[in-house]
Image (tube, grey):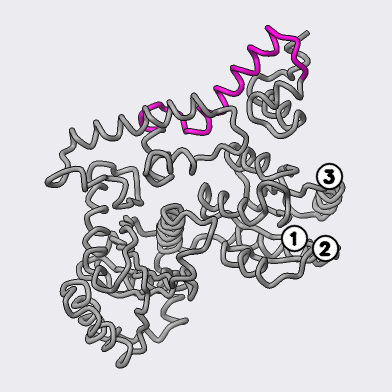
Amino acid sequence: MYNILVVDDEPLICKGLCSLLSSSGLAISQLFTAHNGYEAMDYLRMEDIDLLVTDIQMGEMSGIELMHQAKMIKPWLQAIVISAHETFQYAQLAIRLGAKDYLIKPLNGDQFLDSVRNVLLSVNKLIPSQDETLAGFREQFRLEQPSAERDELLKKLTADPASADATAAALRSRFGTDLSGPYYSVFRVQLGSSSELLQYAALNIAMELLDQEWRPVAYYSGGDAVNVIIQWSDARYEENGTNKIHQLDMLGRSLHTNIANYLRLPCVVGISQILRGAAFIGELGQQAAKAIRWNEEHRELGVFYYGDFNYGRYAQDPTEEEMTAQNNMIVEKSKAYIDAHYAQKGLTLHEVAQKNHVSPNYLSYLFKKDTGHNLWEYVIKLRMEESRRLILNTDLRRYEIAERVGYESPEHFSKIFKKYFGVSPTELKK
């Protein structure tokens, strides 16, 4: 059974799509509707959503921004985008964020249901056993031994910054490997196996996931690890509205989820910072390897971003005591920021993370570990406690209270309130 979230700022469209879905015969458990991106984010944080169906133009938060935020929370979330505009740029952005379809209004009911059915079928695919997966790779690929010379050149690139430009040129001329950057980051995937076949399968998953958008260059880096170099052109790097740490976080968690689920293989992903120039690729590789080391202290976390550990503050690698003190400070500063801004419309985990100069993934982990509940549960707790106080002690109307605690609509506020307290605001007032 599936949970589907339909988001459109036109209530009649939400109603019509839900009516279509309800009578479709699909195995739908629950249908949720939201009329803007902020309402949708609450459902994504609180409910187990399998499929997001979203309009692309919706006031303050567009469907593109909603998809971006949603993928940060759940990199595996499936999405279908609907739009009144047959614009290539919108479609390109939607597909880049993983949309499975881009449908133009007015929607054809049969086409819409076919699209939903196809997406849900992919969600429902049984995860194969590792043997079945590897058999599939044997059938799909010829499994030629990757070029040892190419791997050696890539290892030289990471070990000898002085000859980086010449090595990159040799890779391009001999193997067609494009390393023109000029911005780079490195992902290191530490696999729980030294099997060459599993490493090859992991490389293929990485290449398919990252596709050509990031111009990935993947190679064996020795032992049970593989490295993936991703690149930005000047134009792509300067794109507005995209926080690069959040992008790296999303890619790292997607990589971890796909390898762990598809290969049934435990893995740890280390992510470097972003630097300009091929001469720094070696340093980036070292950063990614260094980030992975923190898995020894945090076994329950599988994705590590180098920038989260603030190495620059220490003359040598920070001790466990120093890191504990730093982590406590991050949580306390995050709680203080939330205490001051919980009533802000559109407050996100990513905003809180950015204020603390850490990745959303690491902040979520620290907050839950330190407080016992996730960050957004803390936001809702503050909002609900304040709204309860206002209901019992003031004569403010429902829409005024909703406004004061950060909700776009009184209807959505009432839904969250009843879910939290078990009674509606009106029932509590009585």
Gap between marks 2 and 3 measured at Cα: 15 Å
Question: Which residue position is annotated with label 3?
Answer: 11
Residue sitting at x 77%, y 30%: 411
Cα separation between marks 3 and 1: 14 Å
Instruction: Give me the disc on residue 210.
Output: none
Label 1 is placed on what type of residue? Ile
Q: Are marks 2 and 1 in contact (CB under 8 Å)?
A: yes
Can you give x and y, in whole percent of width and height, for residue 377 in the image?
53, 30
Task: Name the residue carrying label 1.
Answer: 82
Decide: is 6 above or below 149.
Answer: above
- Badge number at residue 105: 2
Q: Nearer the viewer, residue 429 or 31?
A: 429
Query: Residue 382 falls in which quadrant of the image?
Result: top right
Q: What is the secondary structure assignment of the residue under circle 3? A: helix
Q: x, y (%) of residue 203?
A: 37, 72
Residue visible at 52% across and 47% down in the picture: 73
